[in-house]
């Protein structure tokens, strides 16, 4: 028999992403207007669940946030409650405190929890589901690297930002006959680079899944020069690497469950290219967190709203342990068990890579 739902909770975990607020709004409005549920939001991701730090989510509380990036619930990408830093006898140790979170949910009479996050956050969601918590996941990340959904919300906004940056680099590159490199995010997946590179008319796209040969990049630039094209644009994913080299690590965040922060490949490649190309100045731009900030794109507002509504519908039907997802143009769901453990990379043989090659873009191989 389906449990009678009265109260639900939401939390947002991991790096922030445009569309989080749109999901929070859609969940809250659907839960209240359609089903008459009470809604609360835990603050700072799982840390709020541990500290029982929450706010009531009402129609008023979610008013005016649809377009806004970030999350009104704040987020944390350091707090894994299954391996959590706590002080015991004056010493910091890591331990499993997930039972505290389960007790807090019981204490507040929360019947179901919606977890909005990427790989790390949804791994904990799966683990809470295994402990008997009624969990629904919503797939978030600008990287679009989550298995089980065609698209994560936030990705579209990120490629819009990257494409606009490429448009802007074009005009200045052309004026000064420069070679311009744009480094985009995406961790170990090349989706942002590939899609913004095609949309932003890049001459070279470098993704982690296709290690590059610098001589092939030089060939592409020289080929353009021989045809009178006096500038070139290269978009490089932060996780890209040369055939015989490694990724460039920008920072190690020691207290994060996923401590490696990539960054710096554009500068390295600019430096390497300077030795091989004479006559053109080479400059690099690192787009960084601008890809995650600001307003949410129209596409992401709609996708996030669809995900939020679908998450509450799954709760109303008692279909827990699932993540909402997009398959083709349809919203569907997939078991959290089938989502965790892998990332969705760019297949070097996929149609989009072939499209890029057929219109003369070099993938650096
Ligand atoms: O996963 C989203 C993302 O923006 C990646 O593209 C990037 O590598 C990482 O997060 C940056 O993390 P942080 O915000 O901790 O620097």
Image (cartoon, grey):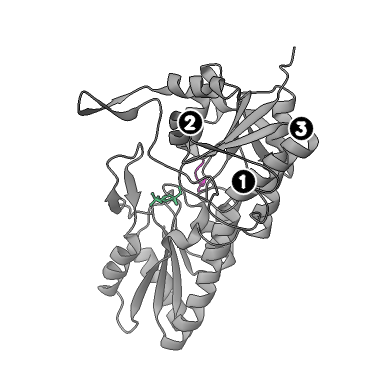
Is residue 271 shown above or below 318? below
Q: Which residue is mark 3?
A: 36
Answer yes or no: do the residues labelled 3 and 2 have beta carbons within 8 Å? no
Boundaries of the magenta span: 343-348
**Rounded to the nearest whole Å, what is the CA distance between mark 1 and mark 2?**
32 Å
Residue lying farthest to the top in this orientation: 1
Query: Looking at the rendering, which quadrant does residue 34 occupy?
Result: top right
Query: Secondary structure under badge 1?
Result: loop
Q: Position of residue 113 (x, y in %)?
A: 59, 29
Q: Secondary structure at mark 3?
A: loop
Residue 313 sits inside the magenta stretch: no
> In the structure shown, which secondary structural element does the residue marked by tag 2 occupy?
loop
Give 255 or 8, whichever is nearer the viewer. 8
Residue 91 location (% of width, % of height): 20, 28
Left or right: 80, with 344 as reference point: left
Label 1 or label 3, whichever comes before in sequence order:
3
Instruction: Place residue 184 in its image quadrant.
Output: bottom left
The x, y position of residue 203, in whole percent, is: 49, 69
Q: Which mark is residue 151?
A: 1
Which residue occupies 58% across, 40% down?
Answer: 139
Q: Quadrant of residue 78?
A: top left
């Amino acid at each position: 028999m389906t449990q009678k739902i009265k109260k639900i909770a939401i939390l947002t975990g991991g790096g922030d992403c445009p569309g989080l607020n749109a999901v929070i709004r859609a969940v809250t409005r659907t839960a209240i207007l359609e089903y008459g549920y009470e809604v609360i939001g835990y603050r700072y991701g799982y840390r709020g669940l541990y500290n029982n730090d929450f706010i009531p989510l009402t129609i008023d509380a979610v008013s005016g946030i649809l377009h806004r990036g970030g999350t009104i619930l704040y987020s944390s990408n350091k707090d894994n409650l299954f391996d959590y830093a706590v002080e015991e006898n004056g010493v910091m140790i890591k331990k499993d405190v997930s039972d505290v979170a389960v007790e807090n949910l019981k204490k507040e009479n929360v019947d179901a929890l919606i977890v909005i996050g990427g790989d790390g956050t949804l791994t904990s969601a799966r683990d809470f589901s295994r402990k008997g918590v009624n969990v629904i996941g919503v797939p978030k990340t600008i990287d679009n690297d989550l298995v089980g959904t065609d698209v994560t919300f936030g990705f579209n906004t990120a490629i819009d930002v990257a494409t606009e940056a490429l448009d802007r680099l074009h005009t200045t590159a052309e004026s000064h006959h420069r070679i311009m490199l744009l480094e985009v995010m995406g961790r170990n997946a090349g989706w942002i680079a590939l899609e913004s590179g095609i949309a932003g008319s890049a001459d070279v796209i470098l993704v982690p899944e296709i290690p590059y040969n610098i001589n092939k990049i030089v060939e592409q630039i020289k080929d353009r020069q021989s045809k009178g094209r006096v500038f070139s644009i290269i978009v490089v994913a932060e996780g890209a690497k040369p055939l015989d080299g490694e990724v460039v690590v920008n920072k190690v965040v020691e207290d994060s469950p996923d401590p490696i922060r990539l960054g710096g490949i554009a500068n390295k490649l600019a430096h390497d290219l300077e030795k091989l190309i004479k006559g053109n100045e080479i400059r690099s731009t690192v787009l960084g967190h601008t890809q995650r900030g600001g307003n949410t794109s129209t596409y992401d507002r709609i996708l996030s709203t669809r995900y939020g509504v679908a998450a509450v519908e799954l709760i109303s039907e008692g279909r827990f342990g699932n993540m909402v997802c997009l398959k083709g143009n349809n919203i569907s769901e997939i078991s959290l068990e089938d989502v965790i453990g892998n990332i969705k990379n760019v297949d070097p043989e996929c149609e989009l890579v072939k499209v890029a090659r057929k219109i003369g873009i070099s993938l650096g191989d």
